[in-house]
Image (cartoon, rainbow, N blue to C red):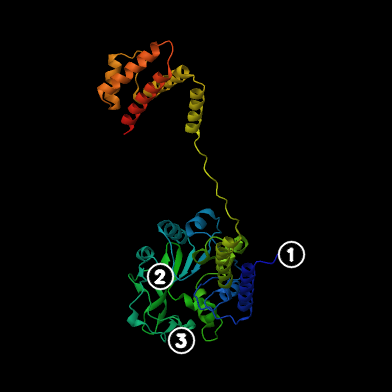
Amino acid sequence: MQKPNKYLLILLATLTAYVLFEYYRPKPIDWRPTYENDDKIPFGTQALFKLLPDVMQPSAIQTVRLPIYNFLTETKFPARSNYLVICQDFKADGNDLKQLLTYVRRGNNAFISAYDLPDSLGKVLGFKADVKDPTKADSTLRQNFVNPPLHKASGYNFFHDDGRNFLSIKKSVGITVLTRNARKEPTFIRIHYGKGQFFIQNLPLAFTNYYVLDHKTSDYSFKALSYLPALPTYWDEYQKQGRFDEDQQSIFRYIRSQPALNWAYYLVAFGLIFYAIFAGKRTQRIIPIVEPLQNTSLEFVKTVGRIYFQQADHDNLARKQIQYFLADVRERFGLNTTVLDKEFTETLARKSGASMAETDELVHLLRNAQKSISLSEFDLLTLNYAIERFNSINTA
């Protein structure tokens, strides 16, 4: 019975130990601000998303997983509706903003809560939301509503927010301040635009699970959202999760989204690579050395020549040698060998680099051999010597 591969056993044992360790160890709190409506972590928005339908009754809440432009141009809307965005950075290009402005101008409402807002949107609506000077950071800074019925005596402290960001109002007409911080700086404003309204707020942490479920701050998000009329509401998740919802998630995308599974994926991948490198070297068969084929043409020619010479067929051998030599001259120098005259001799000497005397002697021997009725052994040896001397001069 074949023994199991020790490298494979080590890989499986390592993977099993890692999975068990990840499964049983206490899960650290994930403080990433995702603002995703299916995240239970402190800075997700699952709590608000589940409670919002009770606040907006009898209107429905629908999740949007398309870019603003695609959604607003491809969707058939009711007469009036709300568009709600809560994210870290509100990313919208010119086409997105054009459609969003048209949507609000026709009598709908857009609620946007984000730290970073496009300058192009601020120029149209009359506000600025740059990230402010870090020296103004103050995590103890409290927020409060301007409207007396919503005002809270102690205010609201979102201490995970550094408190340095606020909205700068560039025009006074059509803009109402809804909340201010303790420095009297606007942090939540309402802007009338056409027949509809924009609600701009730059403290999205206030809408996360941590503060929605904390009794000290739980009512802030619902007071802020109470400014929206009870209409069908579209909750934008594209800004945070992209196009694909849970039903469209591939296995690989789900693995990459889970830190423990992501590390396990890399561990398996690198383990297989190491296994292929180290185990493969020890199990592959020895590659046999294949000797290259040898060129035996020269040996064949020598053998045939010896047979002719041993049979004393000097005339036949000499004429074949003349025939092959002239064929070689035609191929190498491009000369016509039908007539071996003076012009042929001069051209051969010039192209081959041999002296005129040696070339003339060789051509003279070739002519005489062609005219002879029979060639002797002496004639064969003389002709062979002349051809070899000519070839040696030409290849030198």
Inter-mark Cα distance, 1 to 3: 76 Å
**Please, what secondary structure does the residue beneath circle 3 have?**
loop
Q: Residues within 10 Å of mark 3 (few under 14, many from 20)?
A: some
Amino acid type, residue under disc 3 in the picture: Gly
Inter-mark Cα distance, 2 to 3: 24 Å
Q: Are marks 2 and 1 in contact (CB under 8 Å)?
A: no
Q: Residues within 10 Å of mark 1 (few under 14, many from 20)?
A: few
Question: Residue at (32%, 20%) from the top-left corner?
Answer: 362
User: Would you place residue 292 above or below residue 261 in this image?
Assistant: above
| Of labels 1 and 3, the one closer to you | 1
Inter-mark Cα distance, 2 to 1: 66 Å
For disc 1, the marked residue is 1
Name the residue at the right extreme.
1
Question: Residue at (55%, 46%) from the top-left corner?
Answer: 290
Where is the N terminus found, in terms of image quarters? bottom right
**Please, what secondary structure does the residue beneath circle 1 have?**
loop
Q: Position of residue 122 (x, y in %)?
A: 37, 66
Amino acid type, residue under disc 2 in the picture: Asp
User: Would you place residue 312 above or below residue 157 in this image?
Assistant: above
Q: Position of residue 226 (x, y in %)?
A: 52, 75
For disc 2, the marked residue is 116
Q: Residues within 10 Å of mark 2 (few under 14, many from 20)?
A: some
| Of labels 2 and 3, the one closer to you | 2
User: Would you place residue 389 above or below residue 248 in this image?
Assistant: above
Q: Is residue 316 left or right of residue 340?
A: right
Question: Residue at (50%, 23%) from the top-left corner?
Answer: 308
Question: Residue at (54%, 84%) from the top-left corner?
Answer: 214
For disc 3, the marked residue is 155
Amino acid type, residue under disc 1 in the picture: Met
> Between residues 273 and 396, which one lies in front from this camera angle?
396
